[in-house]
Amino acid sequence: MNNILVFGEILYDIYDDIAVIGGAPFNYSVQLSRLISKNDNLKFITALGKDDFSKDAFKFIENENIDSSLMQVLDNYETGKATVFMNENKIPDYIIHENVAWDNIEFNSDIEKSLKEKYDLFYFNILSCRSEKSYNTLKNIFKNIDSKYKVCDVTFRKNYYTKEKIKEALEFINILKINDDELAIIKSLFYPNLQNDNEILLKNLNKDFNIDYIFLTLGKSGASSFYNNQYIFKPSNKIKVVDTVGAGDSFCAALSYAILKKLDIKKVLDFASAVSEEMIQVKGGTAKYNIKAIKEKFNIE
């Protein structure tokens, strides 16, 4: 049995009069919960407001393989939202509402009690600690958790990150998932004089922060990994893209699952790439794809 803990935001994307549940840690949890077995346990730490959105979120989670016992409902804050709109250049943009429930995740007795358990994997992202309250809760988890794998999918959004928070995260983890835009930000902050070469950048991250596994997604170009001093690049297949929302979250969920299943690094990269390619052919970050077929392709029971 695998014991998994996830920390981070649930937020609703608001498109005109339509609200869609999401948030990278939530999408990750949903996708990973569908890959793991019913005997595995995935607990999700977040905070929601006492509103219709939180009722909807709990109803959604009831149908997934996710333990909601660490999800907090706060009286004085609204459930997180991101308002999506067309900017002056007719390009979709968004505002992530501030001082909402997930900015105020409390380090309560339930979390404290849960940290007495041993975990196989712990996941978080940088966006979820944009506020001091949730950041302090996350730092308390860092200090107290006993987890074999510690995963960060950085998820830089707007200006909600600092060099200090990134450094603290990189020093804590042993699995990093990052995209090419995020790697450019890390380069500007930590390696401004280094040449712009993915392999060299990943090698330096591995060396300086002692991160065992690093995965870099490159959009339509493919993805790469750095593990055991070996850089692997996997080009993407040509497929029809329906929606890229949640592609990175499903990639991270799949690589987490593959590592827990003890697949070798090439198969981990291949499996994560295959899953994200399935995801971009369906609509939405929590959409379903044919998990059974992909597992069979990789001989995973």
Image (spheres, rainbow, N blue to C red):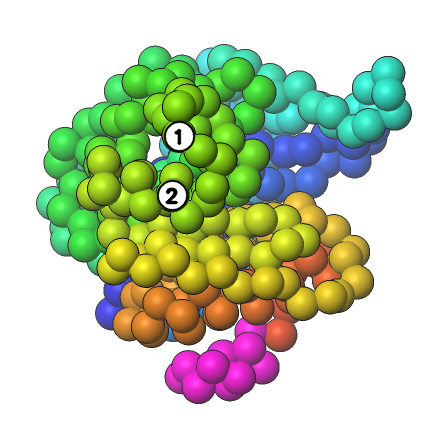
Q: Position of residue 161 (x, y in %)?
A: 44, 20
Between 242 and 22, the residue placed more toward the observer is: 242
What secondary structure is the magenta-colored segment mainly? Answer: helix
Res. 109 in view? no
Image quadrant where residue 126 sits = top left
Look at label 2 and name its amino acid: Ile
Q: Residue at x 78, y 29 (%)?
A: 92
- Image vertical order of residue 32 relative to residue 8, above or below: below
Q: Residue at x 59, y 57 (%)?
A: 222
Between 266 and 32, the residue placed more toward the observer is: 266
The numbered mark at residue 194 is: 1
Part of the protein shown in magenta: 291-301
The numbered mark at residue 277 is: none
Between 44 and 148, the residue placed more toward the observer is: 148
The residue that label 2 is drawn on is: 200
| Left or right placement of residue 274 versus residue 2 in this view | right
Mark 2 or 1, nearer chain start:
1
Q: Position of residue 297 (x, y in %)?
A: 53, 84
Look at label 1 and name its amino acid: Leu
Q: Residue at x 39, y 39 (%)?
A: 201
Mark 2 vs 1: CB contact within 8 A: yes
